[in-house]
Amino acid sequence: MTPASSSSREMHPQLMLLLELQDLRAQHRELEGDEGAAPVEAEHFNIDRDEARTTLGKKIEELEDRLSPSIRSRYNRIAPNRERVVVPVINGVCYGCFVSIATATVGDQDVHQLVQSCENCGSFIYVAS
């Protein structure tokens, strides 16, 4: 692989932030559910759920502040309504809504250098290789 082709496979930094946010939000949701696990977590793993939720919330806010204004605006519109804001495109199909994505959208050689959204469901997309 030449240096030019390897750099085109690197994901856009804003998309990387979105993926990290998605993961932190999932962890935050897990801490909000199943309160029955709290005693075990506290005893065996020394985890205070309230403290962990607070820490995750602050980290989520920090990462949201690093998003560009236009990406943050779209993120704020779609994030409250879905668990996954970033989904893969596999074989030309968006795995957020399972609708085919236009070849022009995902066929670009620099697709990983762009932050793109599915025209159907609005999810941020990346091409899974």
Image: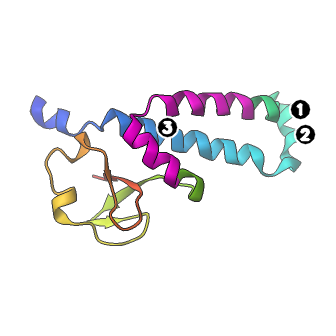
Specify whether residue 72 is painted magenta. Answer: yes
The percent coordinates of residue 1 (x first, y second) are 12, 36
Callout 3 amino acid: Glu
Q: Which residue is mark 1?
A: 43
Q: Which residues are magenta?
A: 53-78
Residue at image x 39%, y 42%? 71
**Where is 43 relative to 124, above or below?**
above
**Residue 81 in which image quadrant:** bottom right
**Where is 97 relative to 55, above or below?**
below
Q: Which residue is mark 3?
A: 20
The percent coordinates of residue 21 (x first, y second) are 52, 39
Say which label, 2 or 3, has the lower sequence index.
Answer: 3
Callout 2 amino acid: Pro
Q: For mark 1, give the secondary structure.
A: helix
Task: Please count the marks in the image.
Answer: 3
Q: For mark 2, give the secondary structure.
A: helix
Label 1 crowding class (10 Å Cα cut-off): few <14, some 14-19, many 20+?
A: few
Callout 1 amino acid: Glu
Label 2 – label 3 distance at C-alpha: 28 Å
Residue at image x 34%, y 61%? 118
The percent coordinates of residue 86 (x first, y second) are 43, 51
**Which label sits on residue 39?**
2
Label 3 – label 1 distance at C-alpha: 28 Å
Residue at image x 16%, y 57%? 107
Specify whether residue 18 is painted magenta. Answer: no
Q: Main secondary structure of the magenta part?
A: helix
